[in-house]
Amino acid sequence: MGTELINVTDIFGENVFNDTVMQERLPKKIYKNLKKTIEEGKELDLETADVIAHEMKEWAIEKGATHYTHWFLPLTGVTAEKHDSFISAPLPSGKVLMSFSGKELIKGEPDASSFPSGGLRATFEARGYTAWDCTSPAFVRQDASGAVLCIPTAFCSYTGEALDQKTPLLRSMEAIDKESLRLLRLFGNTTSRKVTPSVGAEQEYFLVDAEKFLQRKDLIYTGRTLFGAMPPKGQELDDHYFGTIRQRIAAFMRDVNIELWKVGVSAKTQHNEVAPAQHELAPIYTKVNIAVDHNQIVMQTLKRVASQHGMKCLLHEKPFAGVNGSGKHNNWSLVTDDGINMLEPGKTPHENTQFLLVLTCILKAVNQYADLLRESAADPGNDHRLGANEAPPAIISVFLGEQLEDVLEQLISTGEATHSLKGGTLQTGVTTLPDLYKDATDRNRTSPFAFTGNKFEFRMVGSRDSIANPNIVLNTIVAEAFAEACDVLEQADDFDKAVHDLIKEYATENQAIVFNGNGYSEEWVKEAERRGLPNIKSMVEAIPAITTEKAVQLFERFNVFTRAELESRAEIQYEAYAKAINIEARTMIDMASKQFVPAFIGYTKTLADTINSVKAAGADASVQLEILNEVSALLKETKEALQVLVKLTEEAAGKEEGPEQANFYHSEVVPAMEALRAPVDKLEMIIDKEVWPMPSYGDLIFEV
């Protein structure tokens, strides 16, 4: 197979206006001013912006760009962009100039009334602004439309409220930076100047054949299959996980990597996931706001390249019932500008006082705001995934592993930690193989919030969601825990004694959140209830967490969200849930009415004709009659369930928008959808494949 050889070092970042490009193209004074803005958060003056804009435009035009766009993350769950060409007013000669000003670089003006605002803006109040996030580099995206200069931006309303994911994320980064530096200074660190959350987001996804996808209205309209019986084989053999990557998929992955590398996304790991047709891509860690942008680029690239290969990429959390769904693991740590990872325990964690304070502060934050962390991963699709013995349970707990749990138990029971468990050596028993260094701690795939060496892995996030919201919450709750610890320690007469006492206090008061066992077990559900840990099973139950007085005070203290912004987000989420379930219900009604019921009626006629023919021939038709009776009974059940769903969906539409409507969809419409699906899925196992009106699960997940 002839495949063009790729030199990654030659193409990596070639379409990014990165630091190397800026140093080459910008005058030294302008470059220094921009770096100062990025590193110190200073405002960029228009004169500097004009020079940057000119050089950025020239560079982008060399890459084939004809347009630029302010690329932002509104509260729709996807990115948004409006393309403007570089051409200016025609000259008298009829020619045009290509121009791009500093003002155009710094600020854009999309229509704010057409994006979700949760009541922050009236429909007639249209003005909104996008502001360049110069800490996230601009890039040129090359696709079917040509080449477009994409400028990552924040998006806010005319009155200043955040209408996007990036603005509160940047605010939370400032909060965690300030409080982390306070903590580091207490431990004598005078050299670190900035602390930034570092994040790596592992992305799971499914691939299906495009032709089969287009024969399924449920996949087209909702991203998941609303009907479908399991094929004879699913994932029970565990043969897909890390299995050999098929050639069609490998070719797709290769092109995805190339596209990502060009725009500076450090795609590193790729493999088959547990479920058939499921795969994963993981990048190298980077600053959280860049990681958020990169993950959006990853999702867009997966979809675009899949289409080019005659496939469709499914990012829904549960596209197929009966096999594992998809999520993304948000790996979070805190790193200083001079390379110190604040979550690095070292070889003797029991002696690392700074780490133990950081760790127990995080335990306190997660315990106190478990509801907020759960809400940050709330999504209609995640309701099908969380707690389904394939993803973390809906109960927030923290896995620390044997080593750290032992250290905390020493602190709690005796007030002193005198030793740390060692990893040792794992002997393979084969003379030609080397002995392996054994970590002091195993990993726990059932934990929603797991310590994995020098970072925490938040495993709840849904596969199609932005990672912005979970990181906004993580940054802010940990910032508060750091701030409260610093408030105590800065007033202490004896720092060593005070920090020792505080670590013990936090470890003792928050030990209920620590759980190293099997998060899938029923015993854990009961134990978590006994410990007083919340078990928030659905999105509609999770949403109220963001508007509690506790949450409002937290976010307002650190200037991450105002009360109005939080209330607007709650309204948007209730509305998003109701709309998502309404679309699913109406899609089921459409499919059942126009595809399934007619197919079932046609099949009963075929069976009846067969029975009459067999009887006329004087043979026994009892088997055919038995099948006819079974199909007819399930047809009747389908019709009755369809009528109920139609009635409830109409009733839901008349409910007041907000909590009332969302809760009605959750408590009434969703069960009615399940009741309609049940007889249809049973009929799929009876009716001839040739009669079935759409591709089956087996067709979708094994024929790609």
Image (cartoon, rainbow, N blue to C red):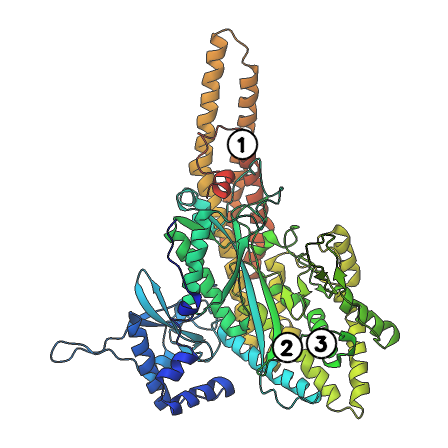
The residues bearing labels 3 and 1 have C-alpha atoms spaced at a distance of: 54 Å
Q: What SS does tag 3 mark?
A: helix
The single residue placed furthest to the left in the displayed view is 93
The residues bearing labels 2 and 3 have C-alpha atoms spaced at a distance of: 15 Å
Q: Is residue 96 above or below residue 683?
A: below
| Identity, as a three-letter code, of the amino acid under mark 1 | Leu
Is 175 on the left or on the right of 62, as rendered? right
Q: Which residue is mark 1?
A: 683
The single residue placed furthest to the right in the displayed view is 414
Residue 135 in the image: state x and y as whole percent.
47, 79
Closer to the camera, 83 or 530? 83
Residue at 32% of width from left, 82% of height from top?
A: 55
Is 612 on the left or on the right of 486, as rendered? left
One can see residue 79 in this view: no
Q: Which residue is mark 3?
A: 361
Q: Which residue is mark 2?
A: 341
Residue 2 in the image: state x and y as whole percent.
37, 51
Total marks in image: 3
Residue at 62% of width from left, 61% of height from top?
A: 459
Quadrant in which residue 87 is drawn: bottom left
The residues bearing labels 1 and 2 have C-alpha atoms spaced at a distance of: 56 Å
Q: Is residue 42 above or below residue 279?
A: below
Compare marks 1 and 2 and give the one earlier in the sequence. Answer: 2
Residue 152 in the image: state x and y as whole percent.
42, 74
Residue at 88% of width from left, 74% of height from top?
A: 414
